[in-house]
Image: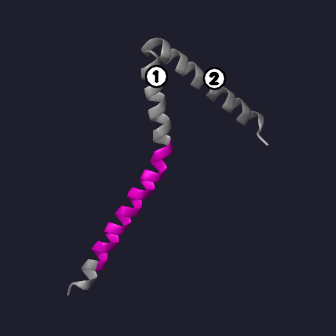
Amino acid sequence: MLGEEQKLAITIGGLLLVGGVLISQALLGTWPTFSVAATVFVGAYVAPRLLQELTIRRFGRQLRRQLGAHRRP
């Protein structure tokens, strides 16, 4: 169950999000606002998987280098 502070934080966050979207729509227009919001959401969705993939590749590269160094006399 959510505490009162968590409920307040979620409410304030939602209000800031809606207010920010409305202000940016008034200043920039509909399509730039949509483009920025879509980029943020897609980035938040893709970033963890991308970071995981890059970390695995880096570890594999380091492992191959270490194994190659140990094989050479």
Amino acid type, residue under disc 2 in the picture: Leu
For the point 32% across and 69% down, the residue is 62
Q: Disc 2 or 1, which lies upstream in sequence? A: 2
Question: Is-magenta flag for residue 46?
Answer: yes
Question: Is-magenta flag for residue 5?
Answer: no
Q: Are marks 2 and 1 in contact (CB under 8 Å)?
A: no
Left or right side of 49 for 12: right
Q: Residues within 10 Å of mark 1 (few under 14, many from 20)?
A: some
Residue extending furthest toward the top: 26
The colour mode here is: one colour
For the point 51% across and 15% down, the residue is 23
For the point 50% across and 36% down, the residue is 41
Amino acid type, residue under disc 1 in the picture: Thr
Residue extending furthest toward the right: 1
Q: What element carries label 2?
A: helix
Tell me where residue 15 appears, x and y as whole percent: 63, 23
**Magenta segment boundaries in residue numbering:** 45-67
| Foreground residue among 28 and 17 | 28
Where is the C terminus found, in terms of image quarters? bottom left
Q: Is residue 27 above or below residue 63?
A: above
Q: Is the magenta stretch mostly helix, strand or loop?
A: helix
For the point 58% across and 25% down, the residue is 17
Tell me where residue 9 appears, x and y as whole percent: 67, 32
Q: Give me the disc on residue 15.
A: 2
Where is the N terminus found, in terms of image quarters? top right
Q: How far apart are marks 2 and 1 (CA)?
A: 17 Å
The residue pinned by badge 1 equals 33
Quarter holding residue 56: bottom left
Tell me where residue 60 appears, x and y as whole percent: 36, 68
| Foreground residue among 4 and 25 | 25
Q: In this view, does 23 lie above or below 7?
A: above
Residue extending furthest toward the bottom: 73
